[in-house]
């Protein structure tokens, strides 16, 4: 029997319906991964908490351009607003406390809480229970 199947175990859909440009598992918490989307948002997922909703909420974490030259503006009653550029690459720090996120010609560093970077001792068991309850894993 092959060591793999040609069917995915589980699939995730970006809540913004934009392309996911990169996905990285946390190096220190086996239940957490991050997604980079083409709409300029970062998603943080914890499979011990939910298989349906990212920790970062359905809108994700918007990472806006920090320079006036690279920010396009739109007219709103609040004045010009910076444009979100596609996030094209993410990388966790070795200790799992930070994410480096590339967007166009900018690099953003995002910090995460200890709950995300280290997790809890019961998180892996919760993730397995969530996957089993949904029929993604055998008993």
Image (spheres, rainbow, N blue to C red):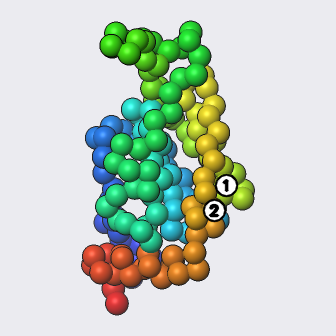
Name the element at disc 2: helix
Instruction: Give neighbour class at mark 2: few <14, some 14-19, many 20+ (Cα, 10 Å).
Output: few
> N-terminal of the two: label 2 or label 1?
1
Which of 137/15 is in front? Answer: 15
Query: Mark 1 sits on what residue?
Result: 97
Instruction: Please identify, in this view, whether the residue under mark 2 or under mark 1 is nearer the observer.
Output: 2
Q: What's the mark number on residue 114?
A: 2
Q: Residue at image x 31%, y 40%? A: 16
Quadrant holding the N terminus: bottom left
* Left or right of 108 in this view: 16: left
Q: Residue 13 at what x, y percent from top left? A: 31, 51
Instruction: Identify the image quadrant of residue 135.
Output: bottom left
Residue at 54% across / 53% down in the picture? 24
User: Of helix, strand and loop, which one carries label 1?
Assistant: loop
The picture places residue 18, in percent across and down from the top left corner, at 33, 37
Q: From this viewpoint, which residue is outermost toward the bottom? A: 139
Image marks 2 and 1: residues in contact by CB distance under 8 Å: yes
């Amino acid at each position: 029997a092959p060591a793999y199947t040609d069917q995915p175990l589980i699939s995730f859909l970006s809540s913004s319906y934009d392309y996911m440009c990169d996905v990285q598992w946390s190096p220190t918490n086996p239940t957490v991964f991050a997604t980079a989307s083409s709409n300029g948002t970062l998603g943080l997922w914890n499979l011990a908490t939910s298989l349906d909703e990212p920790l970062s909420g359905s809108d994700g974490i918007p990472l806006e351009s920090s320079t006036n030259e690279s920010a396009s503006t739109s007219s709103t009653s609040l004045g010009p607003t910076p444009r979100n550029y596609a996030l094209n690459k993410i990388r966790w720090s070795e200790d799992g406390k930070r994410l480096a996120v590339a967007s166009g010609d900018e690099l953003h560093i995002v910090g995460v809480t200890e709950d995300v970077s280290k997790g809890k001792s019961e998180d892996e068991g919760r993730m397995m229970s969530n996957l089993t309850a949904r029929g993604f894993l055998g008993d």
